[in-house]
């Protein structure tokens, strides 16, 4: 039986600290006295401002896991990184897509024995620098890898979220999350099984929705 290699990632949280500088308000300028406005001349008034038209209409926010075009763009940017351009890539075990970030462990194409973690935060709009992943266990590395060309980020929106919504409607469910906060691409190493999954929880039950890589329904685990 093939053994899975489990990553032990060390995450460092860097907090930028900076002292607050208190600015002293400048003294009020000296104003020369002006003659009083004659009683027969009304004081000028400021024109009325239409608050409704003055305020900008906020842009509609699209959930990142439902935006197939954005997901594809993010994957294209990953493949275009200088260290990856024009090279065949493989990623380690699974990939997590969340409403905050995408996290993926990639084999270094120049040093195949090394695995590095890359994170794309939606708020940053760019991929992070690589962070080394510590590997443990006695299994081979190769069975833990999947070719990058077998993974399509846009499938999260085009296939999984579509299946999620169809399942909710078909089974008349009321999910706690309209869009799952975490969607995962999973590799089960012992039998090389690959699939997508996410929690589908309601007030009455905790469930796990799974989808085959071709976008077809696999199962719901309760």
Image: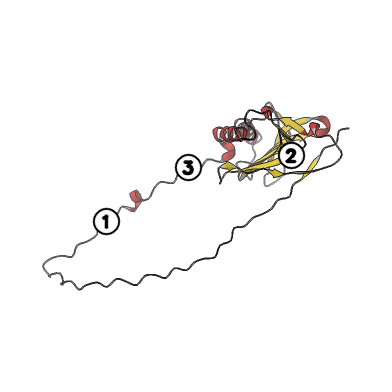
Q: CA distance from mark 3 to mark 1?
A: 29 Å
The tag earlier along the polypeptide, 2 or 1, is 1
The tag earlier along the polypeptide, 3 or 2, is 3
Question: SS at mark 3?
Answer: loop
| 202 relative position to 49: left or right | right
Q: Nearer the viewer, mark 2 or mark 1?
A: 2
* Above or below: residue 27 compared with residue 222: below
- Residue 42 place in picture, x, y as percent: 15, 65
Identify the residue position indicated by label 3 in the image: 60
Q: Are marks 2 and 1 in contact (CB under 8 Å)?
A: no
| 114 relative position to 2: left or right | left
- Residue 108 place in picture, x, y as percent: 71, 36
Q: Are marks 3 and 2 in contact (CB under 8 Å)?
A: no
Within 10 Å of the Cα at label 3, are there few (<14), some (14-19), or many (20+) other Cα atoms?
few
- Residue 161 place in picture, x, y as percent: 62, 35
Q: Quadrant of the C terminus?
A: top right
**Which is more toward the observer, 114 or 64?**
114
Question: SS at mark 2?
Answer: strand
* Above or below: residue 152 compared with residue 26: above
Give the label on residue 115, or none: 2
What residue appears at the point 82 percent right and 37 percent down from the top-left corner?
A: 4
Identify the residue position indicated by label 1 in the image: 48
Give the label on residue 119, or none: none
Q: Nearer the viewer, mark 3 or mark 2?
A: 2
- Report whether residue 100 is seen: yes
Q: CA distance from mark 3 to mark 2?
A: 38 Å
* Above or below: residue 109 compared with residue 130: above
Question: SS at mark 1?
Answer: loop
């Amino acid at each position: 039986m093939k053994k899975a290699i489990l990553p032990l990632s060390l995450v460092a949280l860097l907090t930028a600290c900076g002292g607050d500088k208190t600015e002293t308000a400048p003294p009020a300028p000296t104003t020369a006295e002006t003659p009083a406005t004659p009683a027969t001349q009304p004081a000028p008034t400021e024109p009325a401002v239409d608050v409704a038209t003055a305020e900008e209409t906020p842009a509609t926010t699209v959930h990142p896991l439902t935006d197939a075009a954005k997901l594809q763009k993010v994957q294209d940017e990953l493949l275009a990184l200088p260290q990856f351009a024009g090279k065949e890539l493989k990623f380690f075990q699974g990939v997590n897509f969340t409403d905050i970030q995408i996290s993926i462990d990639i084999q270094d194409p120049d040093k195949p024995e090394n695995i590095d973690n890359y994170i794309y935060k939606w708020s940053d709009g760019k991929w992070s620098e690589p962070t080394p992943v510590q590997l443990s266990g006695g299994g081979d590395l190769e069975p833990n890898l999947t070719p990058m060309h077998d993974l399509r980020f846009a499938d999260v929106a085009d296939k999984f979220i579509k299946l999620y919504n169809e399942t909710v409607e078909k089974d008349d469910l009321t999910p706690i999350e309209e869009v799952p906060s975490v969607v995962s691409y999973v590799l089960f190493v012992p039998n090389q099984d690959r699939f997508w999954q996410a929690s589908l929880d309601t007030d009455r039950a905790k469930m796990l929705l799974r989808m085959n890589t071709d976008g077809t329904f696999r199962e719901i685990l309760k």
